[in-house]
Amino acid sequence: MQKPGNIWSFVLLGALLTACGQESEPQRDADPSDFQKQLQTKLITAQPGDVITIPAGVHQINRGLSLNVSGVTIRGEGMDKSILSFKGQVQGAEGLLVSASDFTIEDLAIEDTAGDGLKVNEGRNIVIRRVRTEWTNGPDEKNGAYGIYPVQTENVLLEECVAIAASDAGIYVGQSRNVVVRNNRAERNVAGIEIENTFHADVYGNITNENTGGILVFNMPDLPQPGHSTRVFQNTVVGNNTDNFGAEGTPVASVPAGSGIVINSNDKVEIFDNDIADNDTANIIISSYFATGFQGTREMAANYDPYPETIYVYGNRFSGGGSSPDGLDLKALKVALFGLTGNLPDVLWDGYVNADKVDADGSLLPEYAICIDNGDAEVLNADLANGSDNIVVGAAQHHCKHEKLPAITLAAPLG
């Protein structure tokens, strides 16, 4: 989330294990400085069409790497074989910073960077495939903010990656367009997967567990591009109950532990055909900018829309969830409405609406409505705009449908 603001003997044994179809641990560089110099040189002198290979092994890197040439591929031998370890990094805000288009990176790991793991800035036709970013010490506020971080990009495919223990978002796509995030795993980050100020994104086939929040679709106020039109489907979002370890004052620090899927201030979002379970605050949270606790610290652009609108939740499979919400206010609300052993409903909505988009009864006009067409799933309208004077629990007022968003088609060629 943009800041500031309120997810590894013996040689013979290794050979025998390999011969038996088992993989030995990656070997560490005999002379780490030589590999680092060679890799830096390859990145600096790269030409369009080059393939830069990362051999198997744990390669020690102590300075940030960068690539500024389009049409380059960086390829390892596997995310658990070719490992760039930045433990002890002394220079650089990222592990690898890419400012280029027509870029592919695949089959390697980036570990223990001082800042973000992999950042791709202002590129088109980006493929990030089977890349693992991880802070091996586990969740820690001092870890880098983002694991995999394409920002201001277009035509992006991010697939089969793993992101672990980022202090903000494991997989983050910001201010981008035409994006597919599929078949990834994010765990023990503050936010597992986050789509922010991005439009036309499909997020599917992913597994998010043990994060503070599983999947976030956010729209922040002081960025040049608003977000809208995101589909979140066929994901497994289970047990995202890790205590929030985001840096104080950042937007992600406001995400309650136990959040499954969170929509904040974003429009035209579909959530469907997901398995969502055992997220202790709520399986789905729908909120406005006003409910985050950090409004006033960021300037709102004149065209910024702080309200979530045209939200469509349907065909998901819910279980558990809402049993132990994070924060005294939510705990008290649960006990008051559902008793000590009860649960908050699957969908928690803060209740803020734009007064210019409501009917005579104060309900959102049909084209902006929050529609829940999901069996017996209920919605808790917390009515925060009115001091929770008129809390409503039920589903009848949200029985509606929206026209479904089209699937994202990525433009060729992609690697």
Image (cartoon, rainbow, N blue to C red):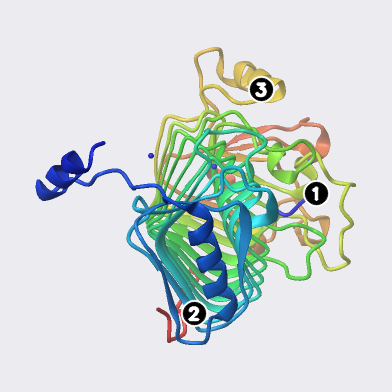
Disc 3 is placed on an element classified as helix
Residue 117, image x and y in percent? 57, 54
Amino acid type, residue under disc 3 in the picture = Leu
Amino acid type, residue under disc 1 in the picture = Pro
The span from disc 1 to disc 2 (Cα, nearest Å) is 33 Å
Which residue is tagged 3? 333
Residue 256, placed above or below residue 106: above
Q: Nearer the viewer, residue 266 or 132?
A: 132
Amino acid type, residue under disc 2 in the picture = Val
Q: Taking the image as drawn, is residue 351 in sight?
A: yes
The span from disc 3 to disc 2 (Cα, nearest Å) is 54 Å
Dot 1, how many residues are within 10 Å of its Cα: few (below 14), some (14-19), or many (20+)? some
Quadrant housing residue 124: bottom right
Q: Are marks 1 and 2 in contact (CB under 8 Å)?
A: no
Q: Determine the residue positioned at 50% across, 60% down.
A: 34
The tally of labels here is 3
Disc 2 is placed on an element classified as loop
The span from disc 1 to disc 3 (Cα, nearest Å) is 30 Å
Q: Determine the residue positioned at 87% across, 64% down.
A: 301
Please give left or right for residue 351 compared with residue 275 in the image.
right
Residue 11, placed above or below residue 271: above
Q: Are marks 3 and 2 in contact (CB under 8 Å)?
A: no
Q: Taking the image as drawn, is residue 407 in sight?
A: no
Quadrant housing residue 357: bottom right
Which residue is tagged 2? 72
Which residue is tagged 1? 4
Q: Counting residues from the N terminus, which is met first, the one under dot 1 or under dot 2?
A: 1
Q: Nearer the viewer, mark 1 or mark 3?
A: 1
